[in-house]
Amino acid sequence: MKKAQKARKIKKVTAPRKRKMGTVGGKTLVLDEVLRCCLAARKASLILAGSSVKDRNRALESMADLLEKKKDDIIFKNGIDVEAAQETGLSPALIDRLTLNEERLRGMAEGLREMAKLPDPIGEIESDWTRPNGLRVQKVRVPLGVIGMIYESRPNVTVDSAGLCLKSGNAVVLRGGREAIDTNGALVSVIREAIASSGLPSDSVQFISTPDREAIRELVGLDRVVDLVIPRGGEEMVRAIRQMATVPVLSHGKGLCSVYVDKTVDVEMAVRIAFNSKVQRPGVCNAMETLLVHKDIAAAFLPRIAERYKAAQVEVRGDEETRRLIGSWVKPATDDDWDTEFLGLIAAVKVVRDAAEAIHHINRHGSHHSDSIVTDDSAAADLFLREVDSAAVFHNASTRLHDGSVFGLGAEMGISTQKLHARGTMGVRELTTTKYVVRGRGHIRE
Amino acid sequence: MKKAQKARKIKKVTAPRKRKMGTVGGKTLVLDEVLRCCLAARKASLILAGSSVKDRNRALESMADLLEKKKDDIIFKNGIDVEAAQETGLSPALIDRLTLNEERLRGMAEGLREMAKLPDPIGEIESDWTRPNGLRVQKVRVPLGVIGMIYESRPNVTVDSAGLCLKSGNAVVLRGGREAIDTNGALVSVIREAIASSGLPSDSVQFISTPDREAIRELVGLDRVVDLVIPRGGEEMVRAIRQMATVPVLSHGKGLCSVYVDKTVDVEMAVRIAFNSKVQRPGVCNAMETLLVHKDIAAAFLPRIAERYKAAQVEVRGDEETRRLIGSWVKPATDDDWDTEFLGLIAAVKVVRDAAEAIHHINRHGSHHSDSIVTDDSAAADLFLREVDSAAVFHNASTRLHDGSVFGLGAEMGISTQKLHARGTMGVRELTTTKYVVRGRGHIRE
């Protein structure tokens, strides 16, 4: 469908009296499901935008209660997905991500109860001033409207997204992975029931049930209806969505993070931070991939961290100097290693001349996510914190700390490495925007 | 060039020792000019990010002084463009926009001096808190980095953009219209000289001089080097850039603005606001296109405003009720009229049942830019201000007041109707982002 045609179609169906849908037959049916979901979400979003935080928090608590109450139904439906996944030969790791049990459901419910306790950004007055002529200008925080979530197998994303969107006064259209389709259907039906019982529109949470991939293309092209699309998944998926989308996209960024150990350091602390950044959970975005070490501390520091890495089965890939200092079990690092997010127990290690070289290396090879300096020298720390162009920069702390709940901001939807709108950990606040509310007494432009 | 290839090429030339450019011959030359400009800007941006506001303000004042001092040179170069434009038969209106004289140059210089007085957003600490475990988290305002500006004939955009970007600590790559190429070249050379004289890098302001359109495609695709692209121009141009760009785009939005005159109003005030919104400067984005009138006030209000519009030669296109009340000189409004930004002395007028219908009409047909309600009823005002989903909503004030300097925010780059990052009037602050600066004492993730 051409853009102009589509715009007309949307305009047409947006008009209540002219609505005309449900054409039967393959693709049209998919498109209609997506459009119908998005339009229903749009309608609900207008009611949500005017709702009280009390109602929204009550809905979150009802969601939590009902998830626990209906746990058997949900686990039963999840069993269908898990069985199908086993039949199709999904990897054990992916099957584990897909599987729900009582404990995981309790975790989701607790997450929702925590969200209910978070401060409400909606209606917050960012600034408020009166011009000399008496015109009063306020910048007020408001919901975005309708958010599309596209994600892969983990079913907790269904609950987290519905919760975060509701908390921030937005309607959401969910499009989960096909492996979790029965699980997600069951979760959404519980969520909608809970929302309705709190007096808010159940249409606030929509679920696209078709496994047809065409649905994604349709969803990310509805820029007159959907305000934001958030893809959560692999790099390939995010890139494909960015290329297709006319709706703005906010996404979790790839994490190629570094720790730089400066000349003057508490070696004990440096070892603790370099070890934690790499090993505590190596498969996530804020884990360290590259360790940079000042040449003057390398002899004292490298053998110590190498011993810890070796014991934890971390494969070390080092430059020449690193290999000379640690020993022959270290593999030589290739050019590509400096640009690779290993997402596993591998660390690339390099000896550098000074902080300036470390900063240059990070800005060139890193993914502008989370980078840390370990140093006792406050001038070096300030230089690093200022010049490293990343979403979060750390001094004497592990890169693993870049996280919404560690920062005390509550649940996060991921960590953005883009610079516009949201940079770093993204929570409830990043799902909002502002509008100017201006009050006059007959003011005109002279 | 494919994306992966391009990424490699950029990576290659970003590395200081590997730089290799200047291949001669047609297209390659254009691409190299763009890439060279952007890389030079990137390098300058790192210095700007660490510069003091004192230096940046001094540079703005030097720019102002030097523009006035070199006015004769600039006006001479402008004459070349104007002559060429006359020969190619550019419309008198466009030639007027292109023409510089002493007064206009003085206006630009004054604009720069005003910018120097604006508060500095860079380094501002948005929030600062310490977690129970002693981890200190700050959210600090920082420049975006490198901004690409693509614009059409008005040469003052060259000076305004260079000034706003410098004020906010960003380097800028300018790509003006080919009609103004000599003028812009002269302005940029003065600007660069002034910046250098203030001790900041002259490379902070780059100018792409080739008239080849391929340069635009190249510029908006350099997402590893350029952080933001701002197109200023017609709707077509902005749409084309949005489609081509992999760099994020921030743009001035189309303005289809409405005034709604409610049941209980001071008719005098309503006439003043509806007249000012339409007539004071009809060709701009925040001028009113559609006037909505409550049925109970229509008989008292419509003939009054009609008389004023008629005297000002505004063509009125009305619905049936409007035509009945005003008279036969009113043309019947077509369906398209509600969706048209006239940008001239035309007003579409409609009588509505109530505020709810007005809000629905505006959300459906408007461009989410600037909309106003005139009413004495505070409940109706609150409903309108809350439910109209626009960048700025007004009560008892003209839509024409949506403007950075009217709001007291200083120079603006335009008004955004998008919801992400910048909504409404965009000034210096919208050219910045934030980063998390986190300080620990050996903190790790447990």
Image (tube, coloured by chain):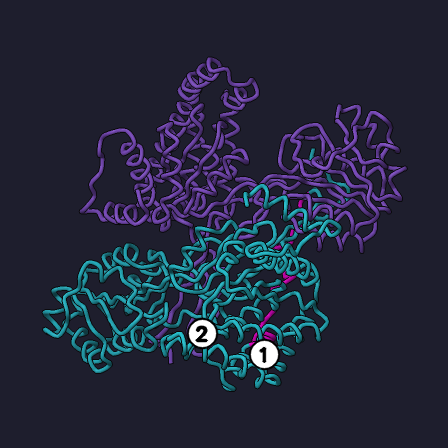
Chain colours: A purple, B cyan
Q: On residue B406, which mark appears? A: 2
Q: Is residue B102 above or below residue B393?
A: below
Residue drawn 66% across and 39% down? A256
In this picture, which residue range is highlighted in magenta? B112-132
Letter of the chain that mark 1 sits on in the rendering = B
- In the picture of the structure, the residue carrying the numbered disc 1 is B113
Q: Residue A393 placed where, x, y %?
A: 69, 48
Q: Is residue A208 above or below residue B165?
A: above
Q: Quadrant of residue B393?
A: bottom left
Labels 2 and 1 share a subunit:
yes
Q: Earlier in the sequence, mark 2 or mark 1?
A: 1
Residue drawn 52% across and 38% down? A114
Q: Which secondary structure lies at badge 1?
A: helix
Q: Residue A315 placed where, x, y %?
A: 75, 27
Can I make out residue A55 in this image? no
Residue B320 lies left or right of residue A104; in this view the side is left
Letter of the chain that mark 2 sits on in the rendering = B
Q: Residue B183 placed where, x, y %?
A: 53, 76
The magenta stretch spans residue B263: no
Q: Amino acid at mark 2?
A: Val
Residue A405 lies left or right of residue B283; in this view the side is right
